[in-house]
Amino acid sequence: MTTSPADTPTLTDVMQLHPLLGEFGIGVWDLRVPRGATPEQRRATLAADREELAGREDTVAETAAWLRENITPIKTPGVNSYGMKHVMERATGRYVTNGEFIAAALIAGYAFRYTEGPNVLFGMSARDVRRVDPR
C-alpha cells in the first residue's frame, strides 16, 4: 500500500499526537534536568525540546524519506530508536537527534511501542537494518 503526500502526517501532526515528543525523545529525563527538578522546570525543558524539534522539519523529512527508501516496515516493534538513529547516521553520514529520528519514523508510518525511557521501539525489518549497517 502506498500513501499519497496528502495522507502523510506532518511533523506538526506527529507532535500533536505525541505531546511528550521532543528533541531528546519521549519525555524529560534526568539527563536533561537537574535531579530534583520541579514540575515547572520539567515542563519548561520539554517545551524547549519541543520547540527545537519543531524547527527541524527539513531534517525530519529527509530522515523519513531515507527510512521509506531503505527500511521495510513490519508489524512487530522491536528496533530501538536510539540504536537505529546510529545505524542511519553511519549509513548516511548525517547526524540526527533521537527525537528527530522518532518523529521521522512516526511520519513514515512504522508500527511503534513506547518504552520506559526516551526511546521508542519501531517495527522495522531486521534484515534491512543489517543490510544498511552490516556491523
Image (cartoon, helix red, strand yellow):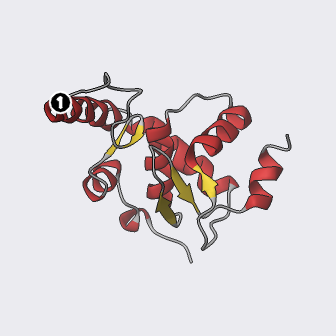
Q: Left of 118 or right of it: where is 129?
A: right
Where disc 1 sits, the SS reads: loop
Quick one: quadrant of the N terminus?
bottom right
Q: Quadrant of residue 93?
A: top right
Neighbor class of circle 1 (other Cα within 10 Å; few <14, some 14-19, many 20+) is few
| Vertical placement of residue 134 versus 45, above or below | below
Q: Amino acid at mark 1?
A: Thr
Give the camera-side residue of 90 and 41: 41
Could you tell me if residue 23 is visible in this image?
yes
| Vertical placement of residue 36 versus 84, above or below | above
> Dot 1 corresponds to which residue?
38
Q: Residue 133, percent across and down?
A: 79, 43
Q: Residue 110, percent across and down?
A: 53, 63
Q: Residue 32, percent across and down?
A: 36, 26
Quick one: quadrant of the C terminus?
top right
Hey, which residue is sitting farthest right in the picture?
134
Q: Residue 117, percent across and down?
A: 45, 46
Residue at 62% over, 66% down: 73
Q: Left of 33 or right of it: where is 24?
A: right
Q: Quadrant of residue 86?
A: top right
Could you tell me if residue 109 is visible in this image?
no
Residue at 60% over, 64% down: 123
